[in-house]
Amino acid sequence: MSLYLVFSVIAAYFILLMIISYFTSRNSSEDSFFTGDRESPWFLVAFGMVGAGLSGVTFVSVPGMVGNNYLFFFQFVLGNVVGYLFITFVLVPLYYRMRLVSIYSYLNDRFGKYTYKTGSLIFLISQSFGAALRLLLAAKILQFAFFERVGIPFFVTVIIILLLVWLYTNKTGIKTIVWTDTMQTLFLITGAAVTIYSITQSLDLSLSESIHAVTNHKYYQVFNWDGQSGNNFFKQFIAGILIAIAMMGLDQNMMQKTLTCKNQWDAQKNTLTYSMILAATQFLFLGLGVLLYIYAEKNGITLARGSEGQILDTDTLFPELALNHLGIIAGVSFLLGIIAASFSSVDSALTALTTSFTYDFLDISKKTGNEKKQYKNWVLIGFSVLVFIIIMAFSESQGDVISLIFNVAGYTYGPLLGLFLFGMFTSVNVKDRFVPIICLAAPLLTYALSWYSSTELEFDFGFINIAVNAALTVMGLLLAKERKLVGSSV
């Protein structure tokens, strides 16, 4: 693709974002950044959340990971659907009943300030790494497609993306993001659909022939019943349930959008609709992955492999074929999709990080309008710098980023999952001051157990490490319990 075309696509997309920001910022207050004035249409939120849930990781990494992991990831997706039912019928009613802005303030009411601050800090760490890793993948592709070709180094590319995000989110935050995410979701799904069409046309396959080619390919394996494998069905399914609860239901980023809905019923319709669309879209991307490998095989495109036969950098497959082999229409649609992924993966994350820190640590709800604006702006800049630092630290990583994200999430979100489940389903009170120690010890013990299990017992925890982590957190809370009982919070 020509440099002029790539630049034109990027510029046009950003101008569109700024137009949306302009219209959504009219008649807004300082609280609009955090709450969206609680008037977002539920169907708009649901569709837009798909883009944030997918990001560049699903757009590029899920199709690529098929080469090493077949379609086993869909077992995890099925678990996600069950996890969203818990979010819909347990967590959403709780959040609306308490009229929360930062969902971690629940922990303050249930346990005390140390637990509250610990829960919020866990989210800040988790979301900072998650947002950075998602943006890393998209930034690498934009670097390959444009910035590197005009002599701009990678770190400047990342700074440019973060600066553009700041320009359209700094005033109204979540109120703007609800609308921009909808557009970004549309571009992501369109990019996948156009690529599928381009591949089938190139290979001269009809729709039925394409389905037959995918379902009869060696990579089309959905279920794994090997008990020692990290891709075992039960490990993936259970992990899918727990990670969905943790990374969506206990995540300020995702729930902040849900809480912009007008009422609890709209919010519940949002989460249910979101879960169905997300599951269908992820299966679409897995099918796309098989088609990409079929195309590579038919055209003699070789991929670098490791000593054990695994593909070394699966995340390069989709961008390589879309930008250099499948024609101009597929290239432009892919570029629009990855640009959408770049912005959707970081704009809502930075808004959620800013909301959590200002409410949970700076008590911004008690500040005046001008003070709110100043605090919000400085915190937003601070987290942008932190995301930049993390991206540069992982800039040389290879392999599929999605596995890295979920493995990291198992360690960072595990204590948060344990805290919320313990708080909602027991009436046990704990010694608040010991909770930070418990939440630090649990992931360290989980890592030690995972290492011992894989090296000595040849049993891979896989994504199930989040269940081990949450269980260890619950055990620690039981050891730190007080004799006095309190009423259940559910």
Image: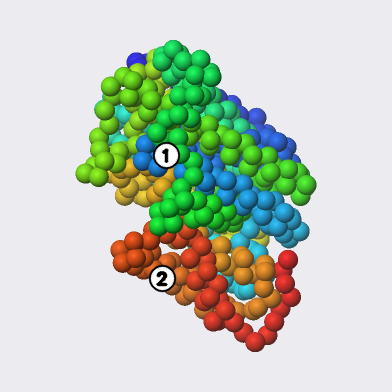
Spatial distance from mark 1 to mark 2, Cα to Cα?
31 Å
In this rendering, is residue 398 above or below 455? Answer: above
Query: In the drawing, does residue 416 fall left or right of residue 441?
Result: right
Quarter occupied by residue 456:
bottom left
Give the amino acid type for the residue marked by disc 1 in the picture: Tyr
| Residue at image coords 49%, 55% | 235
Quickly name the residue at label 2: 445
Residue 70's mark?
A: 1
| Type of the residue with mark 2 | Leu
Tag 1, which secondary structure?
loop
Is residue 16 something one can see in this rendering? yes
Image location (x, y in percent) of residue 240:
54, 51
Indicate the position of residue 46 as horizontal and vertical percent values: 66, 39
Above or below, 196 relative to 370: above
Residue 444 seen in the current view: no
Q: Is 222 located above or below residue 356 in the figure?
A: above
